[in-house]
């Protein structure tokens, strides 16, 4: 998704070549993942010449919210608290990030 968001619209080859520059990955893996994202309605495709061009179906912020919500529902039975506790315990947040999160919590109560 990040590559599609970066490009705005991308073919499987565009995504594959971008990812390949970062790590080894098979073209068929990229193709399969993009098909799954299309099936989940995260991507839509249209034919341009001989290749399909994929685009996000919704704005990035909205889609991230939906993906995180789906993850929380699937892995944590709908509760975000265990996810947040895990991230804090694993020290995934800097001190300034924790202060910012605390401020956001206070402002949204």
Image (tube, rainbow, N blue to C red):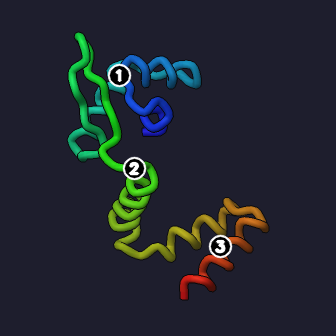
Name the residue at the right extreme. 95
Q: Residue at x 33, y 35 (%)?
A: 55
Q: Position of residue 80 (x, y in %)?
A: 46, 73
Q: Position of residue 31 (x, y in %)?
A: 31, 25
Q: Residue at x 30, y 44 (%)?
A: 57
**Sequence-wise first label, 2 or 1:** 1
The residue at which mark 3 appears reads as 101
**Sequence-wise first label, 1 or 3:** 1
Name the residue at the bottom extreme. 109
Disc 3 packing (10 Å; few <14; some 14–19; many ≥20): few
- Secondary structure type for disc 3: helix
Q: Residue at x 58, y 67 (%)?
A: 86
Disc number at residue 103?
none
Whether residue 39 sits left or right of residue 88 in the image: it is: left
Disc number at residue 59?
2
Residue 50 or 35: which is nearer the viewer? Answer: 50
Disc 1 packing (10 Å; few <14; some 14–19; many ≥20): many
**Sequence-wise first label, 2 or 3:** 2
- Secondary structure type for disc 1: helix
Q: CA distance from mark 2 to mark 3?
A: 23 Å
Q: Position of residue 28 (x, y in %)?
A: 32, 21
Q: CA distance from mark 1 to mark 3?
A: 37 Å
Q: Residue at x 68, y 79 (%)?
A: 103
Whether residue 96 sits left or right of residue 107 in the image: it is: right
Q: Position of residue 18 (x, y in %)?
A: 51, 22
Task: Please tell me in which quadrant of the rendered image residue 92 appears.
Answer: bottom right
Disc number at residue 12?
1
Name the residue at the top extreme. 50
Q: CA distance from mark 2 to mark 1?
A: 20 Å
**Quarter in which the C terminus is drawn:** bottom right
In this rendering, is residue 27 above or below 72? Answer: above
């Amino acid at each position: 998704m990040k590559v599609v968001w970066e490009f705005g619209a991308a073919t499987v080859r565009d995504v594959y070549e971008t990812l390949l520059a970062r790590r080894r990955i098979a073209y068929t893996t990229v193709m399969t993942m993009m098909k799954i994202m299309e099936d989940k309605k995260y991507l839509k495709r249209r034919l341009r010449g001989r290749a399909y061009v994929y685009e996000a179906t919704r704005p990035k912020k909205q889609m991230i919210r939906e993906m995180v919500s789906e993850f929380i529902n699937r892995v944590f039975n709908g509760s975000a608290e265990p996810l947040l506790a895990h991230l804090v315990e694993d020290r995934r947040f800097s001190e300034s990030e924790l202060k910012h999160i605390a401020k956001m919590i206070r402002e949204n109560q």
